């Protein structure tokens, strides 16, 4: 986050908080949320849609705001691997987010994440890209 903050526009705000407990001061204040290779409860909340996780993300977004996530999950991770039908669009909709795209990420999108995890993934694991809007 330190490196990203140096490259971010002057009006960027970085918050360290669990998706389940995003501060109310952010309600409707965020134009876009980028999530790169989450783990734990955030990954679970995106893949097995959690109304709390998705609802809080939707709550902080402005009308027309967007969320983009790069996700990688395979059977070796003790979970069902991601695939073309992995995202429950209806659950996202109920939480105030409309899934616009769910597809394999391009190599350029993975590299652009500038993530150490992305560098370790290389071409060994599929990476999925989710795009949703309020």
Image (cartoon, grey):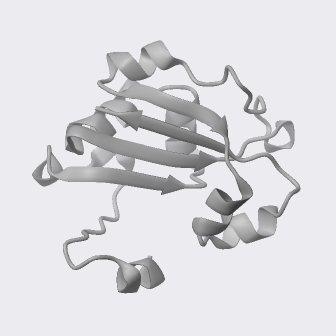
Question: In the rendering, at what x and y percent does residue 44 appear?
Answer: 57, 36
Question: In the rendering, at what x and y percent does residue 66 appear?
Answer: 34, 43
**Count of numbered circles on the image:** 0
| Residue 87 relative to residue 19: left or right | right
At x 32% / y 51%, what residue is drawn? 32
* Above or below: residue 130 compared with residue 32: above
Residue 73 seen in the current view: yes
Residue reaching furthest left?
25
Comparing 88 with 99, the one in front is 99
Comparing 126 with 106, the one in front is 106
Question: In the rendering, at what x and y percent does residue 107 appear?
Answer: 73, 58
| Residue 55 relative to residue 46: left or right | left
| Residue 89 relative to residue 114: left or right | left
| Residue 14 relative to residue 132: left or right | left
Comparing 54 with 89, the one in front is 89
* Above or below: residue 7 compared with residue 87: below
Q: Quadrant of residue 57?
A: top left
At x 79% / y 43%, what residue is drawn? 77
Quadrant of the rendering where the N terminus is positioned:
bottom left
Comparing 82 with 75, the one in front is 82
At x 78% / y 33%, what residue is drawn? 81
Quadrant of the rendering where the C terminus is positioned:
top left
* Above or below: residue 122 compared with residue 2: above
Question: In the rendering, at what x and y percent does residue 72 appear?
Answer: 70, 46
Residue 23 seen in the current view: no
At x 73% / y 32%, what residue is drawn? 82
């Amino acid at each position: 986050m330190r490196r990203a903050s140096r490259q971010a526009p002057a009006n960027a705000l970085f918050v360290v908080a669990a998706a389940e407990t995003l501060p109310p001061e952010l309600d409707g204040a965020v134009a876009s949320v980028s999530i790169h290779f989450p783990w734990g409860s955030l990954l679970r909340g995106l893949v097995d849609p959690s109304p709390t996780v998705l609802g809080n993300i939707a709550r902080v977004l402005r009308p027309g705001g967007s969320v983009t996530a790069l996700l990688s999950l395979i059977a070796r991770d003790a979970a069902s691997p991601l695939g073309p039908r992995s995202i429950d669009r209806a659950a996202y909709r109920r939480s105030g987010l409309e899934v616009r795209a769910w597809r394999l990420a391009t190599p350029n999108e993975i590299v652009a994440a500038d993530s150490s995890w992305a560098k370790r993934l290389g071409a060994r694991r599929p990476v999925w890209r989710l795009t949703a809007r309020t």
